[in-house]
Amino acid sequence: MTTNQSLKPLTVAVNALGHLEIGGCDTVALAKKFGTPLYVLDRYTIESICREYKNAFKSYPKIRMMYASKALCTIATSQLIAKEDFGFDVVSGGELFTVHKAGVDMSRVLFNGNNKSFDELSLAIDLNTGRISVDNFTELEMLNEIALSKNKIVKILLRITPGIECHTHEYIQTGHLDSKFGFDLTQIDEAVELILKKYKHLELMGLHAHIGSQIFETKIYSDEVEILVKEIARLREKFVLNLDEINLGGGLGVKYTKTDKPPSVDEIADVIITALNTAIQKYQIVPPVVYIEPGRSIISTSGVTLYTIGGQKQVPNSTKYVAIDGGMADNPRPSMYSAEYSAVVANKANSEENLQTVTIAGRFCESGDILIKNIQLPNPEKGDILCVFNTGAYNFSMSSNYNRVQKSCMVLVNNSQSDIIVYRETFEDLISRDVILDGLI
Ligand code: LLP
């Protein structure tokens, strides 16, 4: 079993008080000390999955592990993941700036995205970002112009749409794919010709693809490898071009509920390495550098969110709603994707008494702000602490200030110690960018 197959952080325990502990910290005490909603990240769980990835791929020496920052991007998590010897995939000026401020070696950063701005690309070049994954013809031209104006040669990958895409737990394969990301397979040659003949400030290093997220299917990765290696071999023949890099993107799934059964990191690595060796042999190419850039599976399992339970409403002969002090602004995934989560009452972590089936309602002014439907909890009462698991990825990074509620605090726990890594916003923070117009009232 690898960490992405665990519903809870690896250090979860129940202490003598019957309270849930993570990283040796009593979650009820954490809620009291830092307030709720509170994002809690377990350092040991993050380090474990990073090491599992590196270990699983070690038989392919030219592997380069990257972390997809979009899942969660803060200075402290970037420091932690860089320490595990990962590079970074970033998709905005903001993520670029964050990893730079975290002291990440910028030669190990890849800048990706379908509509990067002039300013973002300029910043990426100024910071000596290792690779830029170019998404389309407009960007090729703009990037070359910026590089020319700075008298620099920029190393790029071409983002391609390989004609396979994962839709939740199934995937489709087509000649073309109607996707907003990347060059269609039929457009690659034109892009390569432009780079070789016209865009002299761009140096093409390889190809980049990403086939989906929360993937449970392993074979899709072997198809992706085959397509990318075949393209590299084809381009070598046609353009006498030695492309040495392929980037397979991210996507490995995690376990949000008891019924989720994501493959292990070892299974995915096995499928990818076997497919690589087969394709390298088949197309007779030098083994390329291979980037893997998981986001969710690196950070999701390490994170939980603590909430305080407030009011309750029993609809006659129907649903019992239990309200919490957070919801769709700190975790938009249930309302956006009908995503499912698991939870326990942290201060009754061992209790099976008086189990009730309830629906966890968020505090935001929308009927759709429901965090978990029909979950069994032991007599949830006002003041109890609800712990929702697997919230490390795409929660804080997709959070908002809806209803003008302050964004939550985040703490990192390890060896019974807890450190704030993102402060809770204040009311003053909320209005800090507002302008008061003179003379209106
Ligand atoms: N590389 C590229 C180019 C990507 O577009 C993505 C995710 C990743 C890597 C990382 O994929 P992961 O390993 O995290 O699955 N907001 C959605 C997920 C969107 C993922 C977008 N791209 C969610 O909350 O489920």
Image: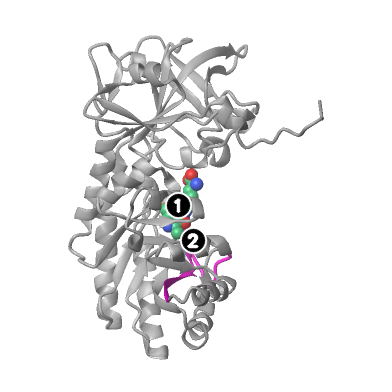
Q: State which quadrant residue 36 falls in.
A: top left
Residue 201 position (above or below residue 108): below
Question: What's the magenta region?
Answer: 153-179
| Numbered circle sitting on residue 76 | none
Residue 221 versus residue 156: which sits nearer the camera? Answer: 156
**Residue at image location 55% in from the left, 76% down from the top:** 145
> Which residue, given by chain and number where applicable, does mark 2 sit on?
123
Q: Secondary structure at mark 2?
A: helix
> Is residue 378 highlighted in magenta?
no
Q: Is residue 302 above or below residue 114?
A: above
Determine contact: label 1, label 2, CB under 8 Å.
yes
Identify residue for label 1.
Answer: 97
Residue drawn at point x = 30 percent, y = 16 percent = 19
Quadrant of the frame with the C terminus: top right
* Image quarter of residue 176: bottom right
Q: Residue at x 38, y 37 (%)?
A: 259
Of pointers 1 and 2, the one earlier in the residue sequence: 1
Give the image location of residue 31, x and y in percent. 39, 19
State the image coordinates of residue 85 (x, y, percent, origin top left): 25, 54
- Residue drawn 32% across and 13% down? 351
